[in-house]
Amino acid sequence: MLQLNFIRENKDLVIERLGVKNFKTAKEDIEKVLALDNDRKSAQKNLDDIKTEENKLAKQIGGLFKEGKKSEAEELKQKTATLKQEEKQVGETLAKIEQDIRTLLLSIPNIPHQSVARGKGEEDNEVVKMIGEIPNLPEDALPHWELCAKYDIIDFNLGNKITGAGFPVYKNKGAKLQRALINFFLDEATKDGYMEVQPPLMVNEQSAMATGQLPDKEAQMYVIPLDKFYMIPTAEVPVTNIFRDTIVEEKEFPIRRCAYSQCFRREAGSYGKDVRGLNRLHQFDKVEIVCIDSPTHSYEQLEVMKEHVSNLLKNLGLPFRIVRLCGGDISFTSALTFDFEVFSAAQKRWLEVSSVSNFESYQANRLKVRYRDKDGKMQLCHTLNGSALALPRIVAALLENYQTKDGIIVPECLVPYTKFNIIN
């Protein structure tokens, strides 16, 4: 969440940048949070004054008892009792104001980086780079869902029978291709200095709140009410929470972690041809990279992470483009996000396979992950993450782009993992 001091000192800037995100109640909410902060200061001063008076009376009472002036001491004790009751009431008022401030701050999104342009949605995003050549497939080229049936590698109907739509069953070489991609992505991340971890697939409410899934994305998450657990929508959530309530050493920067996990998303309201097959699933596999760094170097790390994802796609031989998200498409918690999209030749459309984001101090303030700078002052870290990569649309593009009359060619970088070079 945004820091209260930053809002107080940069009120107009915060309102203007929240407007870029199309946050409709920006001015109203910022004014309200500042008014509540003034109430908080007033209540805190009142409480401090009461405690000062109590301490003063306590000394006087002690002195009176020593002097044998018991009746006068008892009279002051009555005043102390009244002050104690006032202290309790003011303390409760202060606690409520502080909770109201936190609740309001949790509902205000991160402000976007200055490079983020205004826009309503994905149609206003900016393509900043395109790499690779789009393959020229024959007219009878098949979309991936037909290829999956033809080669018996992914069964959507079986998944629908077992669970429901959006939960496919991977079979035969399809299952092996999944495993190959996971291991390839993890090995490449390890080579680039990311420590591999294997996190839980469920998190508690505090963890979901700390990375910004709550209260923003509650409707998109699978919930286990009895235990108040949430199925993770991405490994970002548990991996980033490793550092919740910690003070890290500046010499450790950049702190890099990677993790494979299954991800679970309700994707409420998703339907139609654009979500057919692997295009949008409720359960899918993904390798995530997470970085924690100082504010001074976080945007350098964002470029490093973008390069890492670019290299993965180059190795897979997939044409891709990098897109800077506009204010209307960027997430609640992100300050700057670049999407990576691969071209699906049979569907003739771009498919998002990765988002690489810098959250600046927004998540860190919720997480309370801090470091001491060279002057010994406590500072909030910056957090970043990226998909490296999400598997479903990568598989879709590989199947479609590499299809031939003899079968589907496996990219060279995956053959050591699959132990086969063609799906037929």
Image: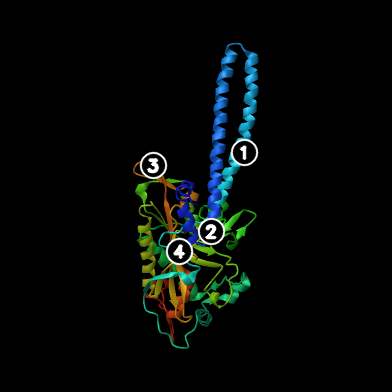
Q: Which residue does the image show at 45% across and 62% down from the upper left? A: 288
Whether residue 105 can be seen here: no
Question: Under tag 1, what secondary structure?
Answer: helix
Few, some or many residues within 10 Å of mark 4 (<14, 14–19, 20+): many
The x, y position of residue 328, in whole percent, is 50, 65
**Labels 2 and 3: the sequence-earlier one:** 2
Three-letter residue code for mark 3: Lys
Q: Which residue does the image show at 62% across and 71% down from the upper left? A: 164
Question: In whole angstroms, how far apart are the C-alphas of marks 4 and 2?
Answer: 13 Å
Query: Is mark 4 in CB contact (under 8 Å) with mark 3?
Result: no
Q: Nearer the viewer, mark 1 or mark 3?
A: 1
Query: Is mark 1 in CB contact (under 8 Å) with mark 4?
Result: no
Query: Is mark 4 in CB contact (under 8 Å) with mark 2?
Result: no
Q: Nearer the viewer, mark 1 or mark 4?
A: 1
Q: Nearer the viewer, residue 356 or 415?
A: 356
Few, some or many residues within 10 Å of mark 3 (<14, 14–19, 20+): few
The x, y position of residue 289, in whole percent, is 43, 60
**Labels 1 and 3: the sequence-earlier one:** 1
Residue labelled with disc 4? 287
Question: Under tag 3, what secondary structure?
Answer: loop
Give me the disc on residue 377.
3
Give me the disc on residue 201.
2
Residue labelled with disc 1? 92
Few, some or many residues within 10 Å of mark 1 (<14, 14–19, 20+): few
Q: Nearer the viewer, residue 415 or 145?
A: 145
Question: In whole angstroms, how far apart are the C-alphas of marks 2 and 3?
Answer: 36 Å
**Labels 4 and 2: the sequence-earlier one:** 2
